[in-house]
Amino acid sequence: MKYRGRPAKYENPEDMQKIIVEYFNECEKEGKKPTVTGLGYVLDMNRTDLINYEKCFECDRLKQYPDAVRRGFVNTIKEAKRFIESCLEDKLVNGTTTPIGLIFALKNNYGWVDKQEVEQTTKTINVDLED
């Protein structure tokens, strides 16, 4: 069966990993925090394409590659996103600026949520009426 569709941007996860490491090193050298969108930019992808690489098994992408190569892409993207999440959380906790943008990024790229727990108890009151 011949694969039909847009060709993949990378032949293997190792090529992608080299660019990711260069991006992280450049961010560190310039004193910037890496972002998911910045990661996509240096990989010549938009955020959606990047997520499709990460979820290639769920969305049936990169079918032209063996499962081991697809798993390599998944792990490469997940590891890069974990590093970015760690950087954002560090800035959220240790930063000196307002956290609104950081919170937005963490909610939209990493599934963070504001959660409010409400504990509800029911009390039974027995009333005896006598004549």
Image (cartoon, rainbow, N blue to C red):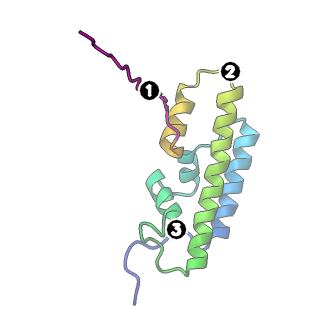
- Picture layout, residue 121 above or below residue 41: above
- Residue at image point 68% right, 28% down: 93
Circle 1 packing at 10 Å, graded few (<14), some (14-19), many (20+), is few
Q: Amino acid at mark 2?
A: Thr
Circle 2 packing at 10 Å, graded few (<14), some (14-19), many (20+), is few
Q: Secondary structure at mark 1?
A: loop
Mark 1 to mark 3 CA distance (whole Å) = 56 Å
- Residue at image point 72% right, 38% down: 30
- Picture layout, residue 16 above or below residue 28: below
Q: Which residues are magenta?
A: 112-131
Residue 125, picture quadrant: top left
Residue at the limit of the structure toward the front, as seen here: 131
What residue does disc 3 label?
9
- Mark 1 near mark 3, Cβ–Cβ under 8 Å? no
* Eye-nearest disc, 3 or 2: 2
Circle 3 packing at 10 Å, graded few (<14), some (14-19), many (20+), is few
